[in-house]
Image (cartoon, rainbow, N blue to C red):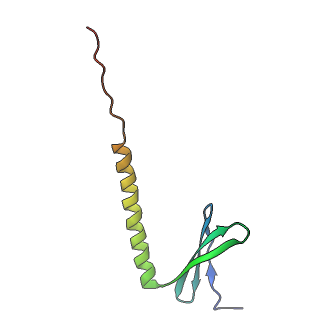
Amino acid sequence: MQTNAAQKFAPIVGDDKRIDLKIDGDSAVISLSLWTDGLGWCAQKTMSLDTDLLDDLHRVIAAARVRIKGSAVEMNENSRPNIISFPTAE
């Protein structure tokens, strides 16, 4: 039995991007891969984060998510059409 084996999580897969996460020892390893026709998934970037960096990354991503969602709501509210009343004959 291997006690030092990396624990992998299900990947996050989009149309042409994939993010893999695994725990290797005391760090999390995040890999970004892109789909290339004829080759398949090709790793582009890999980051190894210790627990402190992982906590910081979680906070930054959460803050960015809130800001992006807030901007989207603000844009929807500002993009409402202006309704102009036509004069009516009396």
Q: Nearer the viewer, residue 7 or 12?
A: 12
Q: Is residue 72 above or below residue 42?
A: above
Q: Quadrant of residue 68?
A: bottom left
Residue at image coords 43%, 82%: 53
90 vs 4, left or right, is left
Q: Nearer the viewer, residue 26 or 36?
A: 36
Q: How many labels, in total?
A: 0
Residue 7: percent from the left, percent from the top? 62, 82
Q: In this view, does 53 lie above or below 3?
A: above
68 vs 13, left or right, is left
Question: Farthest residue toward the left?
Answer: 90
Q: In this view, does 43 lie above or below 50?
A: above
Residue at image coords 39%, 65%: 64
Residue at image coords 28%, 9%: 89
Residue 11: percent from the left, percent from the top? 62, 70
From the image, which quarter does the N terminus lie in?
A: bottom right
Question: Farthest residue toward the right?
Answer: 38
Residue at image coords 33%, 29%: 83
Residue 16: percent from the left, percent from the top? 62, 64
From the image, which quarter does the C terminus lie in?
A: top left
Question: Farthest residue toward the top?
Answer: 90
Q: Is residue 64 above or below residue 74?
A: below
Residue 55: percent from the left, percent from the top? 42, 78
11 vs 53, left or right, is right
